[in-house]
Amino acid sequence: MRIPRFYLPAHYQPGLQITLSKEQAHYALSVLRLKNGHCVEVFDGQGQRAFAQLYSQSRRDAEVHLQQVETYRIESPLNTVLVQAISRGERMDYSLQKAVELGISAIQPVFTERCEVRLDEEKSDKRRQQWQALVISACEQSGRTVVPQVHTPISLAHWLEQDALTGIVLDPYAQATLAQITSPMPSQPWHILIGPEGGLTDSEVQQAHKQGLTPLRLGGRILRTETAAPVILALVQNRWGDLN
């Protein structure tokens, strides 16, 4: 039977008692219908996990009592960063969720010329928090103990101001294929830039190439933006990572 998992950032040690959030308590008590003494697993987002017992005094509040604490990492040997153009609603959610399941190390949302989504500073921060919560949920589901960070959304032009970028930019009209790409260095961030629904402009692809990213095509068919991230990550992990 699969043990329920919860993200609880703290300094873990045996005997520590941690109160679940209201949302977590509701899920544990009302959705999963867990009883007092039920075994659960918790993780701190930094590579530590603990097996614990759940206790509750009411249907709204619950806490866990930590027992066995250990370092447990199932992270990919690759340090991949998804640079994803912001798309609408469920498309963006799907891209980020699957990227986490496939071992992404960090996520940088970007605004591009053809992005249909426009956010002011307040809405941008709120959306980032929503994406971070989705990432945490994907970690709980997939067994990861390290939570990838979702960075503050910025413009692609701003992001490309960095020096010495390494990685790829997906472009259906590029000449290079994955077989021609140099293996990522595990110790260095390897960026994967993916455009929005309408794709990146020629100028954006050229600028990304100028900054160190290799334009890459994935076969002869054009993928949707929400399909591109899980496909390229699965291929990269299969070729150089831990899906082999």
Image (tube, rainbow, N blue to C red):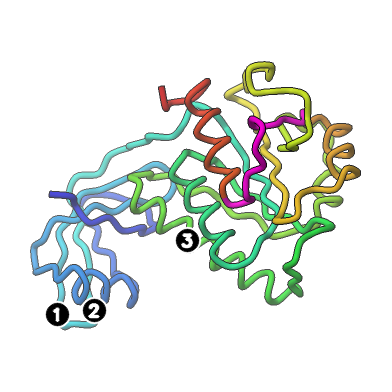
Look at mark 1 in the image and give the residue it sits on: 57
Nearest to the observer: residue 158 or residue 239: 239
Among numbered discs 3 and 1, the one appearing first in the sequence = 1
In what quadrant of the picture does the C terminus appear?
top left
* Secondary structure type for disc 2: loop
Residue sitting at the far front:
220
Task: Tell me which residue sits at (55%, 41%) in the image.
Answer: 105
Q: What stretch is highlighted in magenta?
A: 214-226
* Secondary structure type for disc 1: loop
Left or right side of 61 for 84: right
Nearest to the observer: residue 168 or residue 12: 168
Up the image or down, 178 lies above or below 39; here it is: above
Q: Distance between the residues labelled 3 and 2?
A: 23 Å
Look at mark 2 in the image and give the residue it sits on: 61
Residue 184 on image: x %, y %: 63, 22
Q: Distance between the residues labelled 3 and 1?
A: 29 Å
Look at mark 3 in the image and give the residue it sits on: 134
* Secondary structure type for disc 3: helix
Binning the other alpha carbons within 10 Å of mark 2 as few (below 14), some (14 to 19) or many (20 upward) gives some
